[in-house]
Image (cartoon, grey):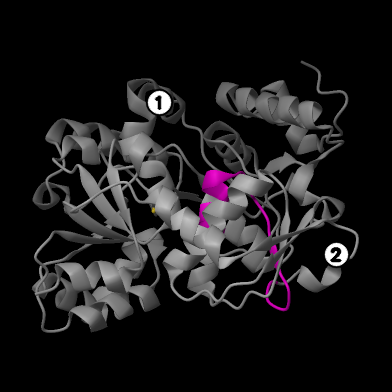
Amino acid sequence: MSGQQIKLTDEQQRMLDGTAGEVAQRLMRLLVRLGQVYGADRMVQISSAQISGVSYKSIGDPGLEFLEDVACKGVRVQVQTTLNPAGMDLEDWRSLGFPADFAERQQRIIAAFESMGVVPTATCTPYLAGNRPGRGDHIAWAESSAVSFANSVLGAYTNREGGPSALAAAVCGCTPLHGLHLLENRRPTIRIAVEVELGSRADFGALGIHVGRLVRDGIPYFTGLRAHVDQLKALGAAMAASGAVALYHVEGLTPEADQHEVDTVPTLTVTREEIDEAYRRLNTGGRPDLVCLGCPHASLDEIAEVADRLQGRRVSTPLWVCTSRAVRNSAAELGLVEVIEQAGGRVVADTCMVVAPMERMGVGTTAVDSGKAAHYLPGMCQQQVVFSDWNTLLEEVLS
Ligand code: F3S
């Protein structure tokens, strides 16, 4: 392949010619090909990458063999690169009941990434774990909820990458300039008038599931929405799950909202009945075997909320609060992990209820307050789902 339709820098051309090795050449070819498919005329330098396809449950032996093959050829990433959640807590997997054969393969996947210079953050909230791009930064991220947060809340520029294209961008330091890397493609395509008062993160998850189904890969512009940052995290994750929303705007809230004209785009109205219907559709289970919070991975504020609720109480059903290792460490320093664990819960790092092999761990019904998790658990983990706000879920299992 010549790559003649895409203007490359000298360094990019050298990679394409194979000067940086066979793996870098293959990965640069992939980026050039993607650029040709999407009509890019050049590459753009990126400041960070975030790679998905980390859990052994997701990529299996073929993925593990591919990564070990790439790693043993000495390839290194050129920019700050972080990882999506793994299939288990990388430190406490034994006490949490993860199968040993799964753990052995998962550790090999992490080792392969580490040998390429990737930071094994193992989180879908890299922006809470040291990889936080600024407004206008070009990045190549793959985790759909993180893509949504980076584009919408932080104002960074990224397309929704796949695992291979994010790895290619990390190694080559660039990505094709197309899609959401261009301001003209970041305009709203539909206005969503929210005519219902929302409270909990679950409400925002239900709204996201409903809107994602309606707009698919559109760019919603919300009006009538008041939200704090953790609620936006839940909203974006859900829209990216039921649809393919990679960017949204919220009037008066998100950084690019006031740059766009919305008078000419169509409007959809969301009512209480539609939110209630989203709740009904997501609820498929009865009594939970596990209550699992932290999708996307919990922030320090969210962990503090849970600790506050559990102080001096006991849970009668297993409880996981999923988060990144970085946030767990901060929570431990503040004594929050101890409070949750004294109540019988676990603060689980590096993984989540969807990418962990729950179906092999004796869990048949999972209770969540995340629209995204409720959407994926039936298909990806053969789970029945209880979907409600975290306060209600905890009240039902607290003694
Ligand atoms: Fe993150 Fe897992 Fe949810 S990857 S967004 S906690 S499904």
Local SS, label 2: loop
Q: Say which residue appears at 85% left-offset and 64% top-offset.
A: 262
Q: Which residue is mark 1?
A: 63
Looking at the image, residue 341 sits to the left or right of residue 243; the answer is left
Assess whether residue 262 is covered by the magenta stretch: no
Q: Which residues are magenta?
A: 234-254
Q: Is residue 143 visible?
A: no
Q: Position of residue 218 (x, y in %)?
A: 72, 48
Q: Quadrant of the C terminus?
A: bottom left
Q: Disc 2 marks which residue?
A: 262
Q: Nearer the viewer, residue 162 or 320?
A: 320
Give the answer, above or below, for where 304 lies relative to 107. Answer: below
Q: Quadrant of the N terminus?
A: top right
Residue 230 image offset from top left, x and y in percent: 48, 71
Tell me the element at label 1.
Answer: helix
Q: Residues within 10 Å of mark 2 (few under 14, many from 20)?
A: some
Along the line of sight, the residue nearer the viewer: 14 or 34: 34
Farthest residue, direction top: 1
Which amino acid, by three-letter code, is at mark 1? Gly
Mark linked to residue 36: none
Residue at left offset 16%, top offset 66%: 345
The residue positioned farthest toward the front in the image shown: 273
Residue at x-position 16% and y-position 30%: 101
For residue 248: magenta? yes
Residue 106 in the figure: left or right of residue 74:
left
As drawn, is 345 to the left or to the right of 250?
left
